[in-house]
Amino acid sequence: MPERTSGEITISASAAAVMQVIADLRAYPEWSEGIDEVEVLDSFPDGRPQRARFSFNPGPIADTFVLEYEWDGDSSVSWVLTEGTLVKAQEGRYTLAVEDSGAVLVTYELAVELSIPMIGKIRARAEKMIVKTALVGLKNRVESPVSEDEENRKNV
């Protein structure tokens, strides 16, 4: 597995609120660029996803893959690829740390390996872009007011 790419962002919310957005995989297409659809295949007894299938199409690299999740309360979540075609391996992690101000520092780490040859610099640049857009999307989603339609969808 190649080295991980990482990024950080501070979000003005509780760790529980941030993790709630991270755990709502079905909503990723609404705020995470390049993700077309997410299907939760299995869930843990607490309702958090255990396995999910993603349809990813950010442009030239499109794939459908399955990730398996491991949750540590509201402090971290990690995942590994269990099925994929173009994406051969993927490991990722969100780690949340509450700052003195009450805001949450979110660290996102990602390592992706494709089944097609890719120059290391290009892969690293693509990973950095994925990490950056995911963190900005997460921050915007957590800090923006939830619409009534979104609230109703969550309660279904």
Image: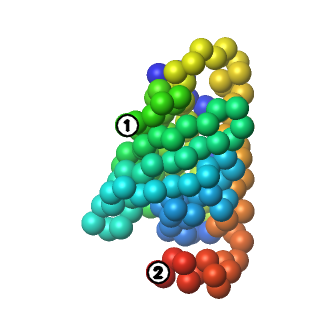
Mark-to-mark CA distance, 2 and 1: 29 Å
Report the amino acid beneath label 2: Val
Label 1, on which residue? 82
**Residue in the picture at 62% in, 50% down:** 35
- In the image, taking residue 75 as reference, residue 62 lies left or right, namely right
**Horizontal and vertical percent position of residue 121:** 70, 18
Front-most of residues 107 and 85: 85
- Secondary structure at numbered mark 2: loop
Q: Nearer the viewer, residue 7 or 60?
A: 60
Task: Name the residue rendered at 69%, 41% in the picture.
Answer: 58
The residue lying toward the viewer, choosing from 5 and 61, is 61
Does the CB distance between marks 2 and 1 fall below 8 Å?
no
138, above or below 89, in the image: below
Q: Is 116 located above or below residue 150 in the figure?
A: above
Query: Where does the image place residue 98, in percent across and percent down from the top left?
Result: 55, 60
Q: Nearer the viewer, residue 104 or 38?
A: 38
Which residue is found at the position 55% from the left and 69% from the top? 17
Give the mark count. 2
Nearest to N terminus: mark 2 or mark 1: 1
Q: Is residue 118 above or below residue 38?
A: above
Residue behind mark 2:
156
Image location (x, y in percent) of residue 52: 42, 51
Residue 78 can be seen in this image: yes
User: From where the camera sits, is residue 19 visible?
Assistant: no
Q: Percent from the top left, x then y, of residue 57? A: 64, 42
